[in-house]
Image (spheres, helix red, strand yellow):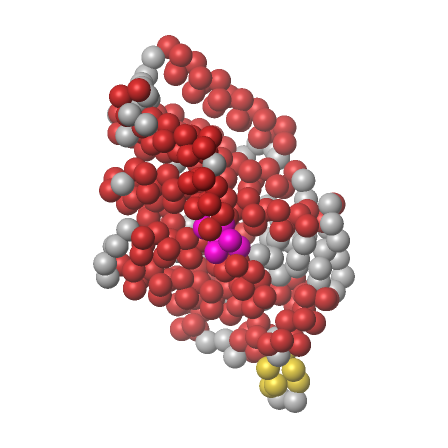
Amino acid sequence: MNDTTVQGPVVNTKSILTVTFLSVAYVLLSTWVVGFKSDQIVLVVIFNTCFYASAISRKFILGFSVFIVYWILFDYMKAFPNYTISKVHIADLYNLEKHLFGINFNGRVLTPNEYLKANSKSYLDVIGGLFYLCWIPVPLSFAAYLFFKNRREFLCFAMTFFVVNLLGFVVYYTFPAAPPWYIQEHGFNFIANTPGNTGGLVRFDHFFNVHIFQSIYQKGSNVFAAMPSLHSAYPIIVVYYAFRNHVGVMKMVLITVMIGIWLTAIYTSHHFVLDVLAGMITAIIGINLFNLLFTRVSFLTNFLDSYEAFIR
């Protein structure tokens, strides 16, 4: 598509009314669906500030709207718990994990989570916590890098991220699954509305006498969404696009972060090995599904062309 056929984002009466309407509508809808939270106002302020600050910040925030839509959908999951749709898998997933990956320790067969919890070390708590803090900043930072380097690749990355998350959401609602920490805390009993838990990441908070992970996980949408591990899926998307865009030595750094997140997910009892493997598979399917759909389905290809021209 010829870029000159698409008018980029401009500030005029129409755009001002549109942004204002969407901002107010988002806050009102969110208050009705999941209750009012200060995070909603922060998001609106960030969006409006970027939209009005400059032409480049306007293009930036409109490009990042893909991630904003994902965040809103994730937040709204609180209003529609997956355990009201399908049966939660607790004991069966735990027993399968132990059967496939069980470790003999002191005369007992333990899951990898149980073994690692029994053998936790302070230095591993710190390293693991640092890796886990990367799971959102790294994808968003890499997206920002692509935005300024190659708008087309930025959009491909953002849409791949969105497709992978949609696949994950589908599994969340068809196969609700309890995380390992839930079984450690509550056994095999299903307890609706169980609040989020830091799991083994609490050791990181205690080590530094902070509440970083506590503040993060108390905002979780649903504790019964451990399968697949999207924490494990996101780094694969980043690494795939890092190789695709030839980012040099940074590829090794991103691979290290990816492996670190995988291992930390298990070490801190946030995910079973099965959850991590499912996250990997979800990422691989999502990447290939994006490449298939957005190159062979004309209206999706045209959408990508128009979106690229709009934020160029």
Please, is residue 130 above or below residue 217 in the view?
Answer: below
Q: Nearer the viewer, residue 29 or 229?
A: 229
Residue shown at the point (26%, 59%) measured from the top left: 250
Residue shown at the point (41%, 30%) measured from the top left: 302
- Give the side of residue 37 with respect to residue 307, left or right: right
Residue shown at the point (28%, 25%) measured from the top left: 3
Q: Can residue 284 be found in the magenta stretch?
A: yes
Residue 79 rendering spot, x and y as whole percentages: 65, 38
Q: Quadrant of the N terminus?
A: top left
- Give the side of residue 8 with respect to residue 77, left or right: left
- Give the side of residue 56 with respect to residue 137, left or right: left
Residue 184 rendering spot, x and y as whole percentages: 65, 68
Residue 58 in view, yes or no: no
Count how many numbered circles sit on residues in the image: 0
Residue 42 rendering spot, x and y as whole percentages: 44, 33
Residue 33 rendering spot, x and y as whole percentages: 63, 32
Q: Quadrant of the C terminus?
A: top left
